Amino acid sequence: MAQCRDSNGYRLAHFGMTKAAVYTAIKADFAIPPESVERTNNAIEKTSGLVITVKDLVAHTGRAEITYIFGYQTKKLIQVNLVWRAPVTDDGATDRLLWAARVMASRISLWGIPSHQIDPNTLTQDGATLMYRGQSKNCMIALISMRVPSEDETSLSASTLSVDGSWLRVSFVENAGALDIFKIESGQF
């Protein structure tokens, strides 16, 4: 079951940690050695990340991808994303993703991060529905969003389908108001 030790990150990975410390946390949390961790970079935000895949992070929900994101200037942990994906052809995907969303929302509430009132059907920039938004006392933001293709999208052939299928994303963000990402400063453009 997913855990958060103190609402300051995810499991043993806490905001402000270096990559070396997060490698150690990943090994302790999931028994995944550093050489099995994928490395990634975001060319636009100029952040970097570590990516792992784990099975049944929430029981009976299949594989989830966990991405640890490190800031542009500090090079320290600023965000953790948990993502479950399912192909359009997976008939039970929506139920499994909804189950994972409910479990994660319940766990986040138990960590002392209250859910803020959000309007039903609030859409995110990537076309997902925002299901949960909470903020801890130390400014950490927890978000849960889910995307399920419409019936029109699922009727398209695999060769013309523009979406990957259904997905659920749970994000823990150190401080959404002051993200450590590359930004064009005023007067530079």
Image (cartoon, rainbow, N blue to C red):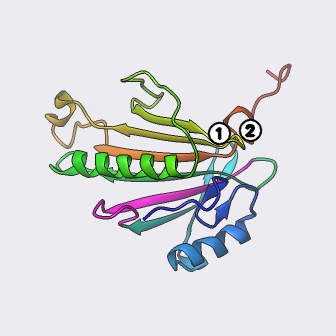
Q: Residue at x 50, y 46 (%)?
A: 109
In percent of width and height, residue 115 lies at 51, 36
Which of the two residues, 26 or 11, is positioned nearer the viewer here?
A: 11
Q: CA distance from mark 2 to mark 1?
A: 7 Å
Quadrant for the N terminus in the image: bottom left
Relative to 37, does residue 73 appear above or below in the rendering? above
Left of 183 or right of it: where is 157?
Answer: left
Looking at the rendered structure, the kind of residue marked 1 is Ile
In percent of width and height, residue 80 lies at 58, 53
What segment carries the magenta color? 56-71
Q: Are marks 2 and 1 in contact (CB under 8 Å)?
A: yes
The label shown at residue 131 is: none
Pointer 2 residue: 182
* Secondary element type, mark 2: loop
Pointer 1 residue: 44
Q: Earlier in the sequence, mark 2 or mark 1?
A: 1
Please say whether residue 125 is one of the residues in the magenta stretch. no
